[in-house]
Image (cartoon, coloured by chain):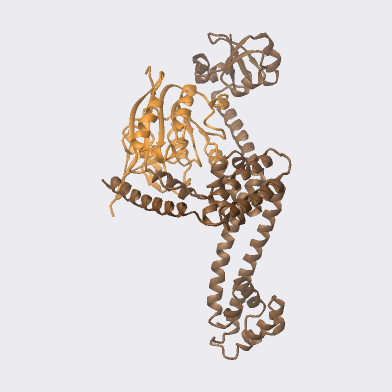
Amino acid sequence: MTLLSKTIVGVLELTEEGDVIQLIDEASLSEVSSSWDKVITDNRWVYETLSDHINKKLDLSNIVLKKIRNNRFEFLLNNSMFIGELADYYDLVREKAIELSRDSVRQFSQGRDTLIAQAVLTVDELQRSYIQLGIRLQEIYSLHFPEILVFIRTSHTLARVISACPDKSELSLNVLNDQGLDSEISKLILNSRETSLGADFDSIDYAMLKSLANEVVGVYQQKTELENWISETMVDIAPNLSAVAGTNVGARLISQAGSLKELAFSPAGKIQTLGAEKALYKAIKSRGKTPKHGIIFQIPEVGTMPFWLRGKMARAFSAKIAIATKLDFFKGENRGTEIRKGLIDYSKTLRERFPKAPERFLRQSKQSYKRNKSNQGKKRRRQRR
Amino acid sequence: MMEERFKPHPKIAGLYTVEGILGVRLATQNMIKGTSVYGERLFQTEFGELREFSFKRSKVAASILQNMTIDNLKRNSKVLYLGASSGTTVSHISDIVTEGIVFAIEFAPIPMRDLLNLSIRRENIIPLHRDARYPEEYTELVDCVDFVFCDVAQPNQAELFVRNLNAFLLEGEGLIAIKSKSISQTKSPEQIFREQSRILESKDFTVSKSVSIDRYHKDHKVFRVIPTSS
């Protein structure tokens, strides 16, 4: 029987009692291995490098190998010319460990799916600041020209108008038409200036309004660009997933799961409630009803389903998403459009089969809701005691 | 304002207690003077510069405050830390084992970046980007150690802890922080801790002590595991 212990400078070959026979170079391990018949090792790499003809065993608690690991430096000192001092040995180990870790962290950062996961979070953040800045801009501008808010509702268009011409007295038909407003609305806006309730500002105030408006336009533009980039990249790295779930939902699923690999290894049931973890764990704890859908609610076919069919549709979609993602991760063929067609057919048949909400469904859902409420109360009381 | 009083910890060399207005806290001697790793407080004392070892962020500190026995965390100890994360606790352990080595295993890539940066500055940390579930993948780099700490928040973390003990603990001790919520959401914490304790008991290892650190970390319990022979 031969014992093999992998070290940083090579593989130690030992007898059963723990006497060192030789130090083998990593590259020549498979050449030497022909003379052994039974091998015990503590290392995955050694185990996988040895050919299958040898009777090999991976044993971590082997006491002889463990003793070597306990005092590896002394074994190496006698058998290798690379190592002279204890500090040298640990420096070598440390360098090697840092190098290995650096490589694998870098490899993780190289994946484009990680980039997408980050980009999705950024889009959400931009969306939030666009809405908040837009509301702020509307509030401020309403001191100057409140009537414009009746005609322009989206903060994006308003911001573009303000950035082109912040002073209401200088507004003209041309300016408004350039921002994509049709001429009738533009005329109404211009006419409403005469009876405006807003105050006039100084030129320094107009400069402030203009720069704020530019900020809103910039945030909106950034968001659109990022969304376009996400859809292009999604089609590139996950064509099947994008075809089945759409690029936006697909990217969100990847972001929530962590990476494309994580998503590909997830079961359909997990994909179905991805993004609804809070509701899921609450339901498991209080033995209530588990959520029907998480992120996949944002797929139009699922979200626009009547409520008694959403669970069915979400189930179908998550199952097909699981298949599509596996196709993407293992670089399979493109069958996304085909799968999606099947799902749309299924949604049609569902609508035909269940045109109305079943009576049973309504009654049951009310009851279970009540039961959940009362259970939660009991649980809380129990904990307090 | 009450003055803060600093005393060496009675059991663990290199660890200090800080008695102040907020009660007793822990601190370690800063290895790299003037730098704080994650925004913790620094104290200038007669023992040199001390860094606060926050029980809120570290389960090791919390369990020391709850009187957990730790015999093998010494100046020249070798330590294996599973689930090192971005290295908050690891930095304090490296303060304590100034002449020893800390093997820090972490699987998630983003905390690993912080850990790598930390280990470049602190020479007794050996960072490894490996999965703690498979100790056979890092046997060539990690030696047998005196002290193992495990905090990976995995459902099967007791099993992987025992695997690591089998591979790397000849004599010494191992500590494992178990979070009942990461094992099951529905079972009661007491039941989970009883089950996990049964997994930790085996032919070679016994559970010698367990303390609840529920006060500082919700639903956590720390078990001390020692080899049966010693």
Asked whether, in this view, residue A120 is left or right of residue B20, the answer is: right
For the point 56% across and 67% down, the residue is A131
Indicate the quadrant containing the C terminus of chain A: top left, top right, bottom left or bottom right. Answer: top left
Q: Position of residue A311 (x, y in %)?
A: 53, 50
The answer to whether any part of residue A9 appears in the image is no
Q: Position of residue B8 (x, y in %)?
A: 33, 37
The answer to whether any part of residue A1 appears in the image is yes
For the point 62% across and 65% down, the residue is A219
Q: Nearer the viewer, residue A3 or B9?
A: A3
Vertical relation: B65 (above or below) A233:
above
Q: Nearer the viewer, residue B41 or A211?
A: A211
Vertical relation: B4 (above or below) A184:
above
Find the residue positioned furthest to the left.
Answer: A385
**Quadrant of residue B68 within the rendered picture:** top left
Q: Position of residue B48 (x, y in %)?
A: 40, 42
Q: Nearer the viewer, residue B79 or A194?
A: A194
Q: Nearer the viewer, residue A198 or A10?
A: A198
**Quadrant of residue A47 within the rendered picture:** top right
Find the residue positioned furthest to the right.
Answer: A333
**Quadrant of residue B218 within the rendered picture:** top left
Vertical relation: A231 (above or below) B193:
below
Total tally of numbered discs in the picture: 0
Q: Position of residue A51 (x, y in %)?
A: 67, 17
Chain A's shade in the image?
brown
Chain that the image shows in orange: B
Indicate the quadrant containing the N terminus of chain A: top left, top right, bottom left or bottom right. Answer: top right
Vertical relation: A324 (above or below) A299:
above
For the point 41% across and 49% down, the residue is B41
